[in-house]
Image (cartoon, grey):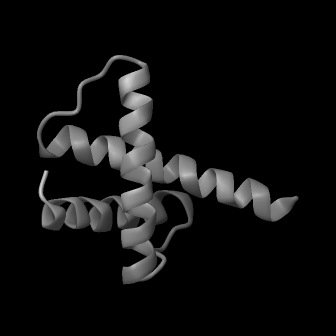
Amino acid sequence: MNFLAFILIGLIAGWIAGKLVRGEGYGLIFNIIIGVIGAVIGGGLFSLIGIATGGFILELAAAVIGAIVLIAIVQLVKKI
């Protein structure tokens, strides 16, 4: 995947995860950061359970799930 597509998926995934978990986004830069890190986490999770991420929709789904996991971990750490 080229860099621009990775950033676009990260932006969309971060925004969706922000809407699902928090009810609002985190802003453009944080949405991209959360989405890109989430894409890495989600890709790892999907490969662990044997789901191949091919195509925009599956890559976006993996990124959103990874971003939600990342947000949940950050919220747990903030409570400690």
Residue 4 is situated, as x and y percent measured from the top left of the image, at 15, 67
Q: Position of residue 64 (x, y in %)?
A: 38, 50
Front-lying residue, 61 or 39:
39
> In terms of image quadrants, where is residue 21?
bottom right
Q: Residue at x 63, y 52 (%)?
A: 72
Q: Is residue 64 above or below residue 26?
A: above
Tell me the residue at 17%/63% (across/down). Answer: 3
Q: Say whether residue 52 is left or right of residue 17.
A: left
Residue 49 picture quarter: top left
Where does the image place residue 57, in percent across and percent down from the top left?
A: 17, 43
Residue 51 picture location, percent across and down: 30, 22
User: Residue 24 versus residue 80: which sits nearer the camera?
Assistant: 80
Left-right relation of 65 to 60: right
Q: What's the residue at 30%, 68% (across, down)?
A: 11
Say which of 19 and 28 sits in front: 28
**Snapshot quadrant of residue 59:** top left
Number of numbered discs: 0
Look at the picture and state if 30 lies above or below 50: below
Where is the C terminus found, in terms of image quarters?
bottom right
